[in-house]
Image (cartoon, grey):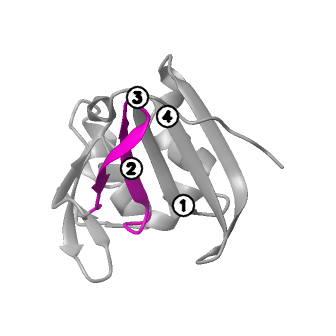
Amino acid sequence: MLNVGKIEEGFVLDHIKAGQSLSIYHHLQLDKMDHTVAIIKNAKSGKMGKKDILKVECDIDELNLDVLAVIDKNITVNVIKAGEIVEKRELTLPKEIKHIFKCKNPRCITSIEQELPHIFFLADEDEGIYRCRYCEEKFDKRRLVQ
């Protein structure tokens, strides 16, 4: 059996759909940081069958967690201090997202004006649909987890 030790300060992302942990790793830009990260793929889960887990030793406030809610708002975020869970954060879809993904519409102003920020607004909360602020192109969130 695999044994991954507990962390003293940081956070654990639990209930990630199996196979999505590496995508989340990159979207949170953990590959650009110098922190200890444990990626557990395809762990057994009574609730989900299989799941992925990310354990990260860093201050959770260093990261933009908005992308997590867009990928899957059912991911559990456990904040760890002194080796114990001190907080469980629930994810909610942000009303607006900046610099997380890019508009794919070739006629969008962001394709021409490279310095413009890529901004998407939440158009349908029930379906989790985001649209570009400039051209209203629909963002397909399935691209985030490929």
Task: Tell me which numbered mark, 4 or 1, is placed earlier along the sequence.
Answer: 1
Q: Residue at x 27, y 44 (%)?
A: 110
Residue stretch rendered in magenta on the structure: 72-91
What secondary structure predominates along the stretch shown in magenta? Answer: strand
Mark 2 belongs to which amino acid? Asn
Mark 4 belongs to which amino acid? Val
Q: Nearer the viewer, residue 65 or 100?
A: 65
Element at label 2: strand
Q: Nearer the viewer, residue 45 or 112?
A: 45
Q: Is residue 2 left or right of residue 134?
A: right
The answer to whether residue 35 is visible is yes
Would you name the residue on which mark 1 appears?
A: 16
Q: Is residue 128 left or right of residue 17?
A: left
> Tags 1 and 3 in contact by the CB under 8 Å rule?
no
Hey, which quadrant is residue 95 in on the image?
bottom left
Q: Is residue 36 left or right of residue 141?
A: right
Task: Tell me which numbered mark, 2 or 4, is placed earlier along the sequence.
Answer: 4
Would you name the residue on which mark 4 appears?
A: 56
> Tags 4 and 3 in contact by the CB under 8 Å rule?
no
Q: Is residue 77 magenta?
A: yes
Would you name the residue on which mark 2 appears?
A: 78
Question: Measured from the top left, where is residue 67 in percent x and y?
Answer: 36, 51
Mark 3 belongs to which amino acid? Glu
